[in-house]
Image (tube, rainbow, N blue to C red):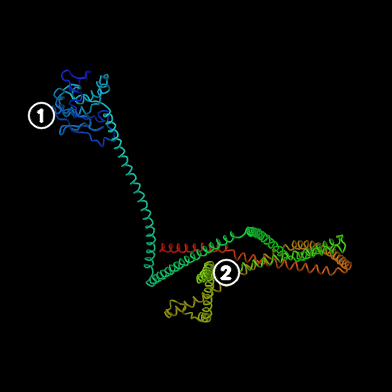
Amino acid sequence: MDHQYRQRPPSARPSTAAQRRPKTAGRNSERPPSSASSFGPVPPSRQMAIAPSTTVARPQSRIGMVANAIVSAAPPRGYSRAGSRVGTSAGVGVPGTALGNRPLNRSTTAMGPRPGTMSRQMIAHQLPLGTAAAQQRPITQQGVSGARAAAMASRMGSRMGTAMGGGRMIADANYYIGLLHNKLNALEIELGNLNEELDKAEKGRENLLAYEQRAEEQAQELKQLQGLLADYNLVIDRQNTHSDTNLRSLEAEADQTALANQKLMAEVEELFRERRLREEQLQELEQRTERLRTENNERMRVLEIEVKEEFNQVNTEVESLRNEMERKKAELVELTKTKEEMDMALANSPLKRQTMLMEEQLQEMREKRAQIVAELQSEQTPEEQRDNFIQKIQKDNKEIGHMQEQLQEINERMAQAQEELQEFQNEFELLAGDKSEKFRELKTRGTQMDNFLDNFDESKRQIEGRISALSKQIVRQLQLISLNCRHGEIVTNVTGLDESLLALGSSAVSADELQDLHVRLQEELITLKQNEALLRSELSSMKTKQTEINENIEKMSNIEEKKKEFRSKSRELQAKRDSLKEELSRLEAENERLKAQIKAEESRFGGGGYEMNRLRELKSRVDQIEKERKQLDEKLTELRTKLDYGPSKQRALELRAEYNELLINAVLGRKSVGVAR
């Protein structure tokens, strides 16, 4: 069986001696071998795409042999394109199997081995592509293609290079291009399969996302349905456990809640409209302020350089004064706090208060003494002192004139600012009109709502406490009234009972009499319980009094130590009082001496009283002008604060934020109520 599949190795000669024909004669219907027949097994990715042929080559008839011989005599036909199968005549070429090409004529079958049966064909299909004889054969004249041609000839079953065989195949550039195209097609198929798998994975992921979103939606819907189910179960339980009246009360309560919800919806809508109106008004105000700011900037730009510098200087001074004022305010707060603490300490201790007064008097006396000593130590004659006083008066007059000019300038600026403010108010009233009134109404209403919301909890607690106290008082009064009304009857009825009625086994006792007896005994029992409660309360009060008495006794047991402490404190205070008395007597003597010295100095100066009076008048006038200047500065700061729109804008923005927060809370509360329902 094996000798039929053995082949003679091809010869090294280029052609046979019998016929001189081209190498491609009789190979016009042959196609290039596939990748499986030339370069090993088919890749796994292409094994599914290319189904192996399961048919077995059948031998051709003699008529087919003649037809193939005629076709083989035709001129050879080249490759139609790179990588395509060799062109054949119509109806002549037969597609090859996955393991090789079928011979096209009968010349190979006539001169070669006999056609194989089914079993032989299957064995031939299972043989490897290259046999040992083909792989061990040396390279021939035809080059590298000799081994491949031998393998092909072994598959075709004929001798290569003879007139009876299929001929030798030329492995030129087109052949390798065809192989490359086959490989590229296999890669494209593999890429297509991978792309399909990728598309499937993408679709699966999209479906997974859609399913997850749907699951979340259904979970939310399930929660809502669970809430509705709980509400329905509650209603059904109440309907089953209570009577028809309770069912009607539930329906009435449901109607009331529906009306309350409608009212809340209307209020929310009204608040939303009010919010929109306020936002529009705020936008108008912001536009107005921006326009005024631009106008002020334009005016400042048009002004002269000196005026700008003066304005900037005034602004810097205002900022510095404002910072100093803040600092002084903080110091004032600290000083007031310390003063309050000291006042509390002085109020609790009369000795400290007296000491404080004496220290103040001492400080005043020291200042007067220092002033008098400075006047006495000045080594100036009365004429020099008079000249100095005159120079000082002239200097003060100049300063007063300068201050009056500044006051006049400030008054002019204030008048101009008032005129501008009046113009601004007139323009604003013309622009606002009814809107300003509505804005005021809305503002007052908003403040009322805020006050109501702030004080709601406290007022509610007060009203509830008042109601509970009144209810307890009413119940107590009713109990007292009932007890007082029936007290006499209870005593007489209970004491005047017939002892024969107590014999329950006797036939003379009726049901009504027993019922009356039961009622009387119950009333008497109630009175006894009340008396017991009163006695218990009195006993508890007596116990508390006893504990207080015991505590007082314990405190009084340490009276000796307290006496010692009080005695030591009194001795210390007496010593301090004695020292203060000595200091006071010394200061009084010093005061008397200084007064005598002052009188002597006044008598010494004699006629200089007019200048002194003039100086005092000028000092008082300067003090008065300083006070007026301070008042004008305060008025100027007030006007500047009125003209400053920054705090108003900030306050408006804060009110808008609070109002928005209230609206959001109201809407969220409504949503939570809807979800709960």
Secondary structure at badge 1 equals helix
Q: Quadrant of the N terminus?
A: top left
Q: Which mark is residue 63?
A: 1
Q: Quadrant of the C terminus?
A: bottom left
Secondary structure at badge 2 equals helix
Horizontal and vertical percent position of residue 668: 45, 62
Sequence-earlier tag: 1 or 2: 1
Residue identified by numbered label 2: 423
Depth check, front residue: 535 or 629: 629
Q: Amino acid at mark 2?
A: Glu
Q: Quadrant of residue 107?
A: top left
Q: Local crowd at mark 2 within 10 Å, few (<14), some, or many (≥20)?
A: few
Left-right relation of 469 to 567? left
Depth check, front residue: 637 or 479: 637
Depth check, front residue: 84 or 261: 84
Q: Which mark is residue 404?
A: none
